[in-house]
Image (cartoon, helix red, strand yellow):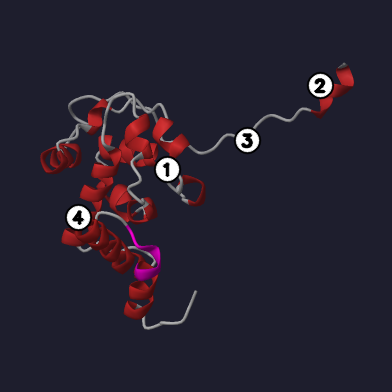
Amino acid sequence: MPRFRRRLQPMRKKKRTSMLKLDAEHVHNLSKRIRDLSGEDVTHCIQCGKCSGGCTVAPDMEEIPSRIMRFIQLNMKERALTSSMVWTCTSCLTCTARCPEGIDIAKVMNVLRMMCTAEGYTPKEKQIHVFNRLFIGMIQKYGHVYELGLMVKNNMMAMTPFSC
């Protein structure tokens, strides 16, 4: 039995955002603005991580949905608007369905994208803004995404019509 215990290694802890108590001085403009634009009160987020656990793109991202929500709570506008998660979110609504507080996180991400566009924040990946616009436009027009058509349009806009 003792030999087995020696082989166990402690789990590495991921870097987390601080869990400061929210008070009136920390809840400023960003959360109010998001509440005005989306109708979602981000201050109700309890940081349980269920949204991040179900997110299909979170494993590939530097920031996870719960961390974006925390940035908003702490009025860290620059961090929230420059995160690649804002643009990579596919609006699949898994996070919204899993949230125990009933926050529509996908709607918050859409509002963050609108804020990024309005305030001149551009994603690191240049083509992702065009892809997002095409993706949302296709859903508005057809009610679903036609993947082949989306990729063809995206490649044509990027001037790479035959890339995979």
Quadrant location, the N terminus: top right
Toward the viewer: 25 or 130?
130
Point 40% across, 68% down: residue: 148
Point 46% across, 45% down: residue: 56
Q: Main secondary structure of the magenta part?
A: helix
**Mark 3 or 4, which is nearer the eye?**
4
Point 13% across, 44% down: residue: 37
Toward the viewer: 23 or 106?
106
**Mark toward the start of the polypeptide (1 vs 2):** 2
**Mark 1 or 3, which is nearer the eye?**
1
65 part of magenta stretch: no
Disc 4 crowd rating (10 Å Cα; few below 14, some 14-19, many 20+) is some
* Residue 5 marker: 2
Q: Which residue is mark 4?
A: 114
Relative to residue 162, is residue 153 drawn left or right? left
* Separation of residues labelled 1 and 2 (CA atoms): 33 Å
Circle 4/circle 2 CB separation < 8 Å: no
Disc 2 crowd rating (10 Å Cα; few below 14, some 14-19, many 20+) is few
Type of amino acid under label 2? Arg
**Mark toward the start of the polypeptide (4 vs 1):** 1
Which range of residues does the magenta coloring cover?
Answer: 145-149
Note whether residue 34 is visible.
yes
Q: Which residue is mark 1?
A: 64
Residue 45 point in image, percent of width and height: 30, 28
**Mark 4 or 2, which is nearer the eye?**
4
